[in-house]
Image (cartoon, rainbow, N blue to C red):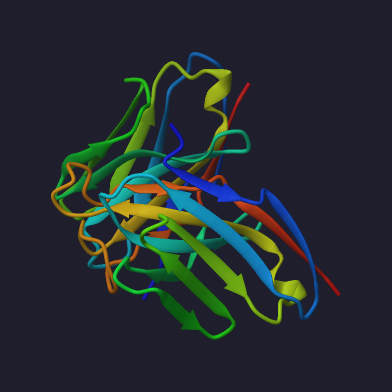
Amino acid sequence: QQQVKQSPQSLIVQKGGISIINCAYENTAFDYFPWYQQFPGKGPALLIAIRPDVSEKKEGRFTISFNKSAKQFSLHIMDSQPGDSATYFCAARFGRGSGNTGKLIFGQGTTLQVKP
Amino acid sequence: KAGVTQTPRYLIKTRGQQVTLSCSPISGHRSVSWYQQTPGQGLQFLFEYFSETQRNKGNFPGRFSGRQFSNSRSEMNVSTLELGDSALYLCASSLSRASGRGNEQFFGPGTRLTVL
């Protein structure tokens, strides 16, 4: 069972454009939603994260939009740069009292290519 | 502050052998989680250790096991290796098990295991 569904699988964007990656979850026991960026040969690095009581969080060129009722969240990368080319993973973490506290479930990943 | 370190970085084994991977968390972090990353299955949760006790376990066979030491360092062991165990094994550490700001999971670079 895929608890966190991520789309698209791959994305090509022109430099300066907006990259949008979407995720949907099913389990309401999740209480924390991070995004990770992974370059080849490296481990995932935390990019930005949000809690479900907030509808939007912005850090620099990266914004998470969160829709609790729809159980969806998305990552927007503004003014995309070639250096942003990487694989992006959304994730959801089980909260306290869920029986799975701290367990992190990942989406399948999106490979982003930003063309110069 | 030093990041999460994993050793070895690369490993080649043959079917039927066993392997032990090591993870040193960020200083002060007490929770260590392990993940398996493959092109087909993405990032899958293996298990989490906190205070030397396994707190969560993913859907992997009993051949996959782990432990955590009093200094929070962790090891995972895979016995009777199969070709399908070839993957990048990632370790992540966090301060505690709770979700939220200040308690994000930070990943190491991973151990690339190849089973021949």
* Residue B109 in view (yes/no): no
Which residue occupies the extreme right position in the image? A116
Taking the image as shown, residue B86 lies to the left or right of residue B53, namely: right
Q: Residue B95 sits in which quadrant? A: bottom left
The quadrant of the picture occupied by the C terminus of chain A is bottom right
Taking the image as shown, residue B12 lies to the left or right of residue B95, namely: right
Q: Residue A20 sits in which quadrant? A: bottom right
Which residue occupies the extreme bottom position in the image? A60
Q: Nearer the viewer, residue A41 or B19?
A: A41
* Residue A30 in view (yes/no): yes
Residue A113, position as x, y percentages in the image? 76, 62
Residue A101, position as x, y percentages in the image? 21, 49
Above or below B60: residue A73: below
Above or below A16: residue B94: above
Identify the residue at horizontal 55%, vertical 49% (top origin): A6
Q: Nearer the viewer, residue A42 or A108?
A: A108
Residue B94, position as x, y percentages in the image? 29, 61
Identify the residue at horizontal 55%, vertical 77% (top origin): A62
Q: Nearer the viewer, residue B40 or A40?
A: B40
Residue B82, position as x, y percentages in the image? 52, 18
How many numbered badges does the structure rendering display? Answer: 0
Taking the image as shown, residue B93 lies to the left or right of residue B28, namely: right
Identify the residue at horizontal 57%, vertical 30% (top origin): B86
The quadrant of the picture occupied by the N terminus of chain A is top left
Q: Nearer the viewer, residue B83 or A104?
A: A104
